[in-house]
Image (cartoon, coloured by chain):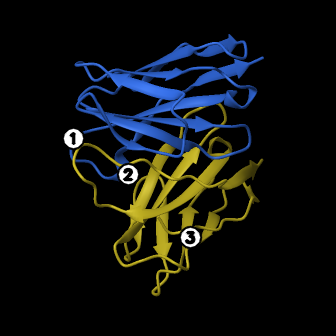
């Protein structure tokens, strides 16, 4: 059983550009959360998708948006990239009716903005 | 979520027990203590959680003080593969439908296992 997968593994973009990151949740999971992890910091919660809708959101600007598809996979979009958006972007999935202990994380996408 | 305080780094000899402390003096009655770890270049991994009783699983033990203001994660026989950043998170287990709520991570403790 494949775990949470993310693509691409690494990405380099220029300031002002737009980027799309992708996540496939673990089999049987219906909720996807996205996190941003800057170097030397813990992951910061961006938002969560459930039933194809944004259910929760952390303290991130509207430049960060997402989508969840009927097969539960998800995309994270970031517009007008800033140098400060350089980070590891983590996706986590969880099964129906789970508590906080059942978040399964993917390996992340390393985004570098130049 | 209640705030947690952890030492930034700790060393432990391979084969010995690693004891990682976490202070959560403002924890409220419905909040659980969760521990995750993040090995270099990987996503965080759930370890264990508890409310007020001590808990043990195949990875670790969690000791929560009687007043619940602090806890200790114990890795009984640390190996080099346990070198990672360990995060202590305090939050309610309740959720409003769907899956688990977003987690709030601090900076954690960087545990280094020495050969």
Q: Disc 2 or 1, which lies upstream in sequence? A: 1
Chain with yellow colouring: B
The numbered dot on residue A96 is 1
Identify the element where label 1 is drawn.
loop
- Image quadrant for the N terminus of chain A? top left
Look at chain A in the picture and name its colour: blue
Disc 3 sits on a residue from what chain?
B
Residue drawn at x 47%, y 67% as measured from the top left = B62
Q: Which residue is mark 2?
A: A101
Q: Is residue B38 above or below residue B8?
A: above
Q: Quadrant of residue B6?
A: bottom right
Crowding at dot 2, Cα within 10 Å, few <14 / some 14-19 / many 20+, comes out as many
Disc 1 sits on a residue from what chain?
A
Q: Which residue is mark 3?
A: B72
Q: Nearer the viewer, mark 2 or mark 3?
A: 2
Residue drawn at x 63%, y 37% as measured from the top left = A37
Q: Is residue A30 visible?
A: yes
Crowding at dot 3, Cα within 10 Å, few <14 / some 14-19 / many 20+, comes out as some
Residue drawn at x 55%, y 64% as measured from the top left = B73
Do residues under tags 2 and 3 come within 8 Å of each other at their CB atoms?
no
Q: Is residue B14 visible?
A: no
């Amino acid at each position: 059983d494949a775990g949470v997968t993310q693509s691409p593994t690494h990405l380099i973009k220029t300031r002002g550009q737009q980027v799309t990151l992708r996540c496939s949740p673990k089999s049987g999971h219906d909720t996807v959360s996205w996190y941003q992890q800057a170097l030397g910091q813990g992951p910061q919660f961006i938002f969560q998708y459930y039933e194809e809708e944004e259910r929760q959101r952390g303290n991130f600007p509207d430049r960060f948006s997402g989508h969840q598809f009927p097969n539960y996979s998800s995309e994270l979009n970031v517009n007008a990239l800033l140098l400060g958006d350089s980070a590891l972007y983590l996706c986590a999935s969880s099964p129906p009716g789970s508590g906080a202990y059942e978040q399964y994380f993917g390996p992340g996408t390393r985004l570098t903005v130049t | 979520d209640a705030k947690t305080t952890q030492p930034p780094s700790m060393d432990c000899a391979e084969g010995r027990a690693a004891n990682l402390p976490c202070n959560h003096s403002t924890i409220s009655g419905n909040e659980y203590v969760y521990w995750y770890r993040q090995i270099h270049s990987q996503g965080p991994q759930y370890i264990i959680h508890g409310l007020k009783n001590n808990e043990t699983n195949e990875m670790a033990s969690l000791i929560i003080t009687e007043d619940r203001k602090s806890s200790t994660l114990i890795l009984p026989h640390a190996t080099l593969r346990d070198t990672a950043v360990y995060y202590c998170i305090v939050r309610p287990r309740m959720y409003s439908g769907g899956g688990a709520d977003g987690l709030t991570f601090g900076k954690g403790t960087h545990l280094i296992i020495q050969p």
